[in-house]
Image: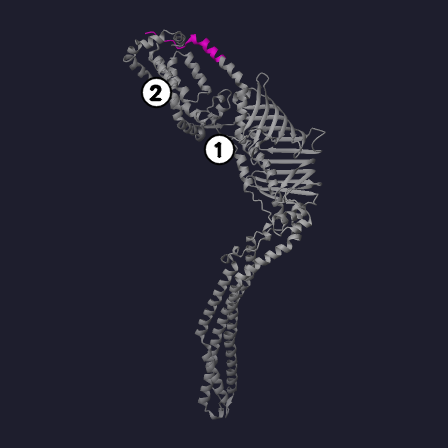
Amino acid sequence: MFTLLKLLQSLVRALHSEGTPQQVAAGIALGAALGLTPLLSLHNLLIVAAIFLLRVSVPGAILGWLIALPLGFLLDPLFDTAGSALLIDAGPLQPVWTAIYNTPVLSLSNVNNTVVLGSVVGWLLLAFPIFLLARAGVRRYRATLGPRIERSRAVRAVRATKLYNLFRLFQP
Amino acid sequence: MRRPKLFRWRAIVPLGLVTGLLALAWWALLDRVVERVVEETGAYLVGARVDLESADVRLREGRVVLRGLEVTDPSAPMSNLFEAAEIVADVRLRPLLERKINVDTVVVRGVRFGTARDESGELEDPSPQSGLIAREVSAWADAVRVPPLSLEGLGRVVDAAAVDADSLRTLVEARALAARADEVRTTWDRALAGLDPRPRIDSAEALVRRLQNTDLRGLNVLGASRLVGDARATISELGTLGEGIDDLSRTGQASLADVRTQLAGLAAARQADYAYARGLLELPSLDAPDISPAIFGEAAIAWVRPVLYWLRLAEEYLPPGIDPRRFRGPKRPRRAGTTVTFPSAASGPRFLLEYGELGLELGGEGLAAGAYSARVTGLTSQPTLYGKPLELVARRAGAAVGPSDVAVRALLDHVSAPVVDSLDVSLGGIQLPSLDLEALGARLVLGEGATQLRLARSGDRLGARWSWRAPQATWVRLRGTASGDEAAGAAQVGTRAWAEELLWRTVSELRDVRIDVELSGALREPSLSVRSNVGQAVASGLRRELGREVERVERETRARVDALVDEQVARARRGVADLETKYVDEIDGAREALAAVRQQLEREVQRLGGRLPGGLRIP
């Protein structure tokens, strides 16, 4: 229930934030990395830093994370297979993995795990299509449904809270 | 249109604060994280729970202190394989950034083996890989067949039904022999009928008689010539008949020799049937090589089991070469996947302990009670990268307790394949363990003595010998109440009480006990042999005491076998005897008669071969 509420909240915030459709879409694409790949990984620290430091939509990133999270669990077998193909079966790539495995800090990235590698590669491949789809979706929403929801009482009430002011700090 | 800025500069400070908080949380939780990692990795390796009381990580000093480590024995979850009071490791920091643990020195204090646990250390949900080695060693131990030593069967009435007539070789062979004799006889009769010698012999005899009664003076030249010609033709016919009978005789001799061999084979078959029937009755073997494993087999398995376990563990986690290796991924809500390590010749090993000192305390009253100090060098997960073998040397540290003579040296050379391990353990003047010997119904208190283990392994092959010497052993009876000749005499022969009395009387006087356990063959499934002077003493005692009983039971068993096979064997014998008689009567008779008549004919022809009256020659 909480997750659903959070999802709705993020959806509304993302779509109604002052960011451009590109910023929201970029936030969703980056946030998808947190959901598609195992969360406690080194690359996700970089993703989180990027979300906060780059002018992408933070609500968009949260939205992307929440949408991608169940997908990540569902796609794990696929990621595992892809990771195995790259790590174990692809002999020519072994020098690359050996170099990464033996390089300080990089070796902490866990890319020598089949699920981590498969999911990171999966996200890298999906990131741009996600961006394009999200941008088109946001544009369409803002042109049709958005203005009516913007004027609704519920949204105005939320905007009047102090929490919203804090949240604005991270708006694009 | 204004282009949006790329960076959100306002977020840097809050982000820095959040990062700082995260770092602080990591710092605060680091000890707990290390604790969990040690427990989970240990449980994966051992296949049973590993508990750590606390971990203290001092990154600035590069020191990790682990306290209260308890490693459960996977085959006995209520006891620990070992425990260590404190482990202080000086760790190099830079390799940690490569996820490698390089320990310069480690000091382990208060190591104890086989301590009891408060709660079971069994894993609730072990992964298929965790504890695999322990399970494989257990499977080997379970598969080792320890021969039973049961004397109770001696008193049983021989169960005739237990000897199945259809399973007796003698019966099968006797039936086959009888059939073969019939077949030879039939073939013989047919061949003899084909030759049909009797009418021709009779005709020749008639001719002889005619020749004998002929007066040459009463014959003309033509008549005499015809008569001699008839005689010569008959001699020639008899020659051909003789050759035919000789051929038949040769074939007959061969067939007869064949059935005679088969007849002789019945004796061996009968012996095999005796052995089979004896096996059904489960009579004990009275040979020392069979009795020693029956007495000490279980104890020997328990002794060598940890040796095999540690050897296998070293093989698995200290492999030669630098090929990528695969492990199950970390435990997490998401799929664990497979983690692959990619060692590099240009880089260091994943785990390396350059030098370690261990303070060991071995059992209070156990195998080798006492305090020891051990030194280990070159313990690494990638020996090829380290380039030197692992060496472990242990010596006695405590002066007041423990063995008076200790020498432990292990060398594990896994730098390249094939791996070569050697272990030499020699402990003298130690308190040896007590053994509950179920087969004898007694406890053997070995007392003070010595033990020596020599092990050499190269590749997959293993050879090890573990010797135990106890010059002052004593025995404690575990079953039965009375003792002595009187009680043994009172008990009915073959009952458990009788058997226990007998064994107790045999071993209770034995003081000097020697046990030798040998392992040889493939590391994964070595063969185990046990020898002991106890086995020899029991064997000779049993031979002395049980000889008469065993003979009686065996006699009854033989009688049963004889009763089942005698009729068929007699029939087969008769068949062979008939055959021999027939051969003598028919073949030899025909041959002798043929030879006699031929000889007579030739004599008569010679007589007539002279000249007719008047000097005429018979053509």
Say few, some or many: other residues with alpha carbon within 10 Å of mark 1 (under 14 / 14 to 19 / 20 or more).
few
Q: Looking at the rendering, which quadrant does residue B370 occupy?
A: top right
| Residue B504 location (% of width, % of height) | 66, 46
Report the amino acid beneath label 2.
Pro
The magenta region covers: B1-20
Please name whichever residue, B3 or B526, is drawn nearer the observer in this view of the structure.
B526
Q: Main secondary structure of the magenta part?
A: helix
Residue A109 vertical placement versus B530 (above, below): above
Q: What residue would you read off at disc 1?
A: B128
Q: Is residue B12 magenta?
A: yes
Q: Is residue A70 left or right of residue B532?
A: left
Q: Nearer the viewer, mark 1 or mark 2?
A: 1
Say few, some or many: other residues with alpha carbon within 10 Å of mark 2 (under 14 / 14 to 19 / 20 or more).
few
Quadrant where the N terminus of chain B is found in the figure: top left
Q: Distance between the residues labelled 1 and 2?
A: 39 Å
The chain letter under disc 2 is: A
* Residue appearing at x 35%, y 12% in the figure: A13
| Residue B391 location (% of width, % of height) | 63, 31
Please name whichever residue, B596 or B502, is drawn nearer the observer in this view of the structure.
B502
Please name whichever residue, B122 or B395, is drawn nearer the observer in this view of the structure.
B122
Q: Does the magenta stretch include residue B160?
A: no
| Residue B268 location (% of width, % of height) | 56, 60
Q: Looking at the rendering, which quadrant does residue B410 occupy?
A: top right
Q: What residue would you read off at disc 2?
A: A129
Q: Is residue B212 left or right of residue B491?
A: left
